[in-house]
Amino acid sequence: MKIKEVVAALERFAPLPLQEGFDNAGLQLGLTEAWDVSGALLCLDVTEAVLDEAIRKGCNLIVSHHPLIFHKLAHISGGNMVERIVMRAIEHHVAIVSMHTNMDNARGGVNFKIAEKMGLTDVDFFVRKEGADAGSGVMGTLPAPMAADAFVSMVKERFGVACVMANQLLNRPITRVAICGGAGSFLLDDAVRAGADAFVTGEMHYHDFFDHEQQIQICVIGHYQSEQFTNEIFRDIIERECPGVRCCMTETHTNPIVYL
């Protein structure tokens, strides 16, 4: 099977037009029409260690969530991590494709996976994209109402986080939960208007925590932590649409943030 067939399957699930205007999702490098796929390494971030892992495991395709090439490259001389990865990936004939905000916005994408990990039901978009079955965030219902402290503890356990950045704990039960993987502060007011009791995201600005006391329970769990299960979406798509293609979930931990 050609690499282009794997890329096409991913893009059928999360079409590139769903990406935000600032994004650079899709093919990053590689000759997808010419190369047969020897294996796909699935990851959140493309780092030098991830590329080493792909080469070691005989995978000539890397599927990442975050794009390797996000900003224009003025030159490629090995002066930073992105340039070194581009040079070495070309040398070893490794193609790289990234499914970023198009996978965030797709039905069944990143936010639906986060909801699944929390056991939410009746999950659907609470901010929709015009003209498509897609949206920026999802909301669902807990199996049973939870006290705020129990909810925060559950989130910590499900996502393996060392700590949760939260505002004042709600003094009412939490039932409806809004979600945005990664940096989701732009959806906080929409979550309030949609009637969410809690909002779970990966990043939020300091000033966003003000003026929401007893209005909504904010839970910020870290960018990497919120999106860490995206690999499972890639795996399921490829195994379903491209039978026989070997999928390897990365064993490389790429979160650059250390909690001390």
Image (tube, rainbow, N blue to C red):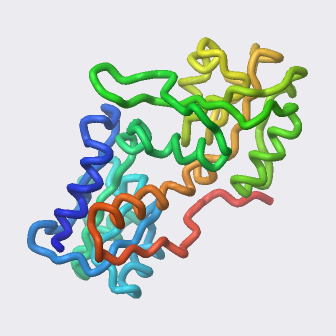
Residue at the image position 80 percent from the left and 30 percent from the top: 145
Which residue lies most toward the left here? 34
Q: Is residue 153 depicted above or below 63 in this figure?
A: above
x and y, in percent, of residue 81 in the image: 41, 66
Quarter of the image where the C terminus is located: bottom right
Q: Is residue 97 depicted above or below 221 in this figure?
A: below
Quarter of the image where the N terminus is located: bottom left
For the residue pair 149 and 254, the one nearer the viewer reads as: 149
- Asked whether, in this view, residue 95 is left or right of residue 66, the answer is left
For the residue pair 100 and 125, the one nearer the viewer reads as: 125
Residue 255 placement: quadrant: bottom right
- Asked whether, in this view, residue 22 is left or right of residue 35, the answer is right
For the residue pair 236 and 143, the one nearer the viewer reads as: 143
x and y, in percent, of residue 147 in the image: 87, 32
Q: Is residue 22 depicted above or below 246 in this figure?
A: above
Q: How many marks?
A: 0
Residue 199 placement: quadrant: top right
- Asked whether, in this view, residue 122 is left or right of residue 233, the answer is right
x and y, in percent, of residue 212 in the image: 75, 16
Residue 192 placement: quadrant: top right
x and y, in percent, of residue 52 in the image: 42, 81
Q: Is residue 18 depicted above or below 223 in this figure?
A: above
Residue at the image position 55 percent from the left and 65 percent from the top: 254
Residue at the image position 64 percent from the left and 39 percent from the top: 120
Residue at the image position 84 percent from the left and 25 percent from the top: 173
